[in-house]
């Protein structure tokens, strides 16, 4: 029985080796890793289109990489790195606060799946463009991600046999369904089974509209403000918190917005602490600036009837995000070398976007119909 078990184990290792042979990208050592992984991993670049290269990090399943599904993970932003998901959410290890050592994540998704993390679009993280031009839109991002997937399967051809899923969070509410549509209807044979989105953004209007309900039903503001909102923003049970023409409604919505985002609570997870005393990441501030765009020209100081006054600023947010450890670790020279990152590329950051790119992105943003 022992000999048979050993033989099966050796066969499994041999099979995986024969299936995933792209040796130049394999990660054989990681600075700060204090435990021996029971999985393999690769880091390198996938070509999206001529001159556009997306950085990927691929980890095999700890259970059965041959049979377990393949999952693509995408963070949002737009313009934020999926390595944030790897190193602080669902990856096999996370970075300690010292920015130098790693610890095992016992809840890693690669316990039961092969997981591919893709930094998208070009300009995000270590992904780059030869011509330094990074303006894009949602449709182009979906096309680039689809071509990058083809590049991945060219490097790891046997993983086309695994069930394939696409997962995204935040602006992944756009990334995941638009890419899924291309995968499901494309000519390349991929064993696609579905997609999922967590905390997803698919509509700015719906996002703003529901935020007011979220604040009230989580007890962030009281009955007086809720009553005033209903009187001034609602008609026969239908409420318009998104783009009301009523100046009073705009004022009240600004108050609600201010309470949610300036109260010091962690709006990503109300029951978890914020990184108190630390400045929030500028990429996060940029993301929050997309909320209540219609009211940004109407900041008000409003005295609500319960005696609470609220001064609203759409760029000040609670310091709940801290990516210092990940930034420090990923920018170490020995880490970059281990991940096969060229010395010519700039330093890694959590979110990267220039003003011209952002303007073009918002101007040209088109929403491909969601796959059903």
Image (spheres, helix red, strand yellow):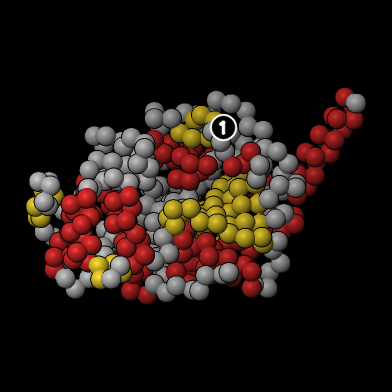
Residue 15 screen position, x and y as percent: 80, 44
Residue 261 screen position, x and y as percent: 25, 49
Residue at horizontal 20 percent and vertical 57 percent from the top: 227
- Front in this rendered view, residue 64 or 101: 64
Q: Eyeballing the image, is 240 above or below 308? A: below
Residue 9 seen in the figure: yes
Residue ID for mark 1: 106
Residue at horizontal 67 percent and vertical 62 percent from the top: 192
Position of residue 331 in the picture relative to residue 315 (left or right): right
- Front in this rendered view, residue 14 or 235: 235
Question: Which of the image's four quarters has the N terminus?
Answer: top right
Residue at horizontal 34 percent and vertical 59 percent from the top: 210
Question: Which of the image's four quarters has the C terminus?
Answer: bottom right
Residue 160 screen position, x and y as percent: 72, 58
Q: Eyeballing the image, is 96 above or below 191? A: above
Residue at horizontal 45 percent and vertical 33 percent from the top: 95
Total numbered labels: 1
Residue 3 screen position, x and y as percent: 90, 26
- Front in this rendered view, residue 333 or 74: 74
Please identify the quarter of the rendering in which residue 290 is found. Answer: bottom left
SS at circle 1: loop
* Residue count near mark 1 (Cα–Cα under 10 Å), binned few <14, some 14–19, many ≥20: few
Residue 124 seen in the figure: no
């Amino acid at each position: 029985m022992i000999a048979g078990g050993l033989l099966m184990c050796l066969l499994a290792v041999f099979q995986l080796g024969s299936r995933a042979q792209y040796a130049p990208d394999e990660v054989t050592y990681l600075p700060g890793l204090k435990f021996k992984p029971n999985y393999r991993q690769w880091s390198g670049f996938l070509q999206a289109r001529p001159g556009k290269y997306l950085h990927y990090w691929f980890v095999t399943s700890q259970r059965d990489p041959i049979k377990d599904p393949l999952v693509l993970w995408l963070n949002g932003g737009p313009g934020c790195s999926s390595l944030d998901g790897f190193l602080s959410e669902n990856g096999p290890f996370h970075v300690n606060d010292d920015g130098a050592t790693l610890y095992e994540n016992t809840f890693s998704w690669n316990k039961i799946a092969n997981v591919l993390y893709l930094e998208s679009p070009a300009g995000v993280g270590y992904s780059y463009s030869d011509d330094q031009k990074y303006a894009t839109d949602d449709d182009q991002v979906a096309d680039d991600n689809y071509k990058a997937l083809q590049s991945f399967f060219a490097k790891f051809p046997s993983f086309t046999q695994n069930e394939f899923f696409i997962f995204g969070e935040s602006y992944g509410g756009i990334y995941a369904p638009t890419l899924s549509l291309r995968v499901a209807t494309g000519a390349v044979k991929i064993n696609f089974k579905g997609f999922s989105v967590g905390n997803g953004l698919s509509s700015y209007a719906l996002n703003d509209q529901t935020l007011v309900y979220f604040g009230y039903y989580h007890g962030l503001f009281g009955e007086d403000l809720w009553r005033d909102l209903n009187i001034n923003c609602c008609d026969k049970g239908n409420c318009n918190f998104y783009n009301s023409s009523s100046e009073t409604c705009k004022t009240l919505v600004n108050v609600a917005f201010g309470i949610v985002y300036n109260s010091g609570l962690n709006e990503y997870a109300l029951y978890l602490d914020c990184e108190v005393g630390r400045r929030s990441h500028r990429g996060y501030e940029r993301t929050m600036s997309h909320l209540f765009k219609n009211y940004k020209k109407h900041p008000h100081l409003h005295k609500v009837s319960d005696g609470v006054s609220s001064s609203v600023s759409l760029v000040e947010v609670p310091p709940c995000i801290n990516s210092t450890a990940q930034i420090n670790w990923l920018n170490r020279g020995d880490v970059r070398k281990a991940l096969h990152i060229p010395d010519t590329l700039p330093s890694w950051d959590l979110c990267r976007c220039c003003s011209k790119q952002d303007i073009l992105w918002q101007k040209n943003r088109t929403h491909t119909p969601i796959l059903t």
